[in-house]
Image: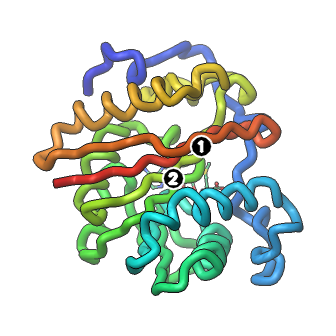
């Protein structure tokens, strides 16, 4: 791994991140049952509404005539998947499916494949082409984000949409976990979260990944939620 670049490389090793204000939405924060999960009014409604709006208004117009297969990376448990199923069912008339990859599957949910998001070895065997990749507070945990993007290319459609949510480090006791190599410079502060910086980060990832296919991408949506201490972006990607 090239650690001379400014996005990958150790930052302040004395700093242990606490994610103190950052909201992770899984566990029971989506709601305890289907009705609560479905309600955009209860619980963490602001975030749920954001996810709903982004899928419904930003991504949907591109996929309206297609079968929509969503992969949630680092989904933790069924809560995130139930919520995403609800959002897709509400947004699309056509067929939709939701699956997840995680390091563990404590509830034995059949939609979750136990896998490492740096190699996708297990989900690759399922030969499914995902066209929405949802990643909520996962990317910053990966030690090898270059291989994450490289191997992702093998499990997606020719045209697909990345919807990534990341913590903003300036509200989270700053910077990744002790000794962690994946410092995402565009989320250091809210001011750093610009389209240029996101492009720079992704350019670096895709060029270091040395993907056989031609990959073109465009950032089509960004959002910062200071209350929840999150940044999110949507990227349209084409591979040939
Ligand atoms: C901060 S949690 C976010 C969980 C959930 N998406 C949410 O927003 O609440 C990060 C998740 O990523 C998973 N994770 C970390 N490294 C991973 C890897 N290499 N491959 C797959 N999942 C990983 C963790 O197990 C954890 O559930």
Judge whether residue 76 can be spotted in this image.
Answer: no
Rendering coords of residue 197 (x, y %)? 47, 24
Name the secondary structure under disc 1: strand
| Count of numbered labels shown in the rendering | 2
Measured Cα–Cα span from mark 2 to mark 1: 7 Å
Q: Residue at x 43, y 27 (%)?
A: 181
Taking depth in this image into account, of 72 and 38 the one nearest to the observer is: 38
Residue designated by label 2: 163
Q: Residue at x 41, y 37 (%)?
A: 143
Crowd around label 2: few <14 · some 14–19 · many ≥20 (10 Å): many
Q: Which residue is mark 1?
A: 232
Give me the residue at 46% from left, 86% from top.
Answer: 95
Quadrant in which the C terminus appears: bottom left
Instruction: Measuring from the top left, give residue 206's x and y in whole percent.
Output: 27, 37
From this view, report whether residue 208 is shown above or below residue 82. above
Give 60 or 40, whichever is nearer the viewer. Answer: 60
The answer to which quarter of the image holds residue 42 is bottom right
Quick one: label 1, few (<14), some, or many (20+) residues within 10 Å? Answer: many
Asked if residue 43 lies left or right of residue 210, the reply is right
Q: Judge whether 57 appears above or below 212 on screen.
A: below
Q: In this picture, is 166 found above or below 238? A: above
Q: Is residue 98 left or right of residue 48?
A: left
Residue 202: percent from left, percent from top: 37, 34
Q: Is there CB contact under 8 Å for labels 2 and 1?
A: yes
Tell me if I can see residue 60 in this picture.
Answer: yes
Q: Secondary structure at mark 2?
A: strand
């Amino acid at each position: 791994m090239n650690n001379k670049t400014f996005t990958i490389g150790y930052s302040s090793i004395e700093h242990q991140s606490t994610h103190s204000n950052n909201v992770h939405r899984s566990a029971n924060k989506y709601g305890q049952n289907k009705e609560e999960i479905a309600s955009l009014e209860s619980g963490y409604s602001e975030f749920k509404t954001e996810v709903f709006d982004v899928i419904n208004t930003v991504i949907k117009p591109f996929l309206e005539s297609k079968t929509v297969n969503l992969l949630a990376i680092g989904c933790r448990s069924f809560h995130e998947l139930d919520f995403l199923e609800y959002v897709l069912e509400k947004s699309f008339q056509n067929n939709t499916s939701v699956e997840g990859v995680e390091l563990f599957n404590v509830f034995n949910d059949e939609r979750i494949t136990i896998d490492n998001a740096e190699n996708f070895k297990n989900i690759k065997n399922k030969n499914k082409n995902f066209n929405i990749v949802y990643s909520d507070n996962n990317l910053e945990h990966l030690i090898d984000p270059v291989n994450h993007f490289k191997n992702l290319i093998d499990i997606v459609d020719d045209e697909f949409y990345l919807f990534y949510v990341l913590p903003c480090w300036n509200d989270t006791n700053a910077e990744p976990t002790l000794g962690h190599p994946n410092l995402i410079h565009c989320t250091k502060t809210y001011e750093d979260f610009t389209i240029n910086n996101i492009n720079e980060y992704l350019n670096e990832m895709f060029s270091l990944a040395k993907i056989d296919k031609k990959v073109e991408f465009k950032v089509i949506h960004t959002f910062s939620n200071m209350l929840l201490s999150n940044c999110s972006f949507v990227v349209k990607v084409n591979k040939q």
